[in-house]
Amino acid sequence: MTQTVYEDVMRKSRQTFNSVLGTNDPNLSLFKKSGGKMITWHGLSDPLIFPNGTSQYYDRVLAQDASAKDYYRFFQAPGIETEALSVEF
């Protein structure tokens, strides 16, 4: 696979699956309307997913909806790697 083909496949994949897998949209209005409640936490020692991205997302949600704290909370866990608390089903 050439670099050009790879980039085209990735672009098409993002377009096709963003509505299902995308995590960057701070608009939670449909979630709020459904009555949902959400807790997000992030281990601050996570070596793979940097905590600033999660924190910035939460800030963007609050900037868009000042009442988001009524249905969405975010917690940081100092010294914890996210996979350290994984649950197997």
Image: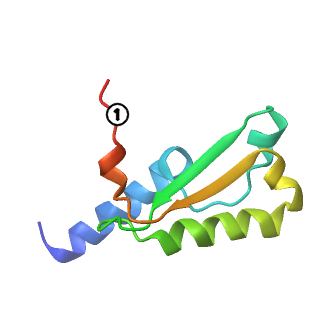
Q: Determine the image quadrant of residue 67.
A: bottom right
Q: Residue furthest right?
A: 67
Horizontal and vertical percent position of residue 73 = 69, 52
| Towards the viewer: 85 or 39 | 85
Q: Residue drawn 72% across and 49% down?
A: 72
Horizontal and vertical percent position of residue 76 = 54, 62
Q: Amino acid at mark 1?
A: Val
Q: Residue furthest front?
A: 79
Q: In screen coordinates, is 85 left or right of 57?
A: left
Horizontal and vertical percent position of residue 65 = 84, 60
Q: Quadrant of the C terminus?
A: top left
| Towards the viewer: 19 or 74 | 74
Q: Residue drawn 33% across and 63% down?
A: 10
Q: Residue drawn 73% across and 62% down?
A: 61
| Towards the viewer: 17 or 5 | 17
Q: Residue furthest left?
A: 1
Q: Determine the image quadrant of residue 2.
A: bottom left
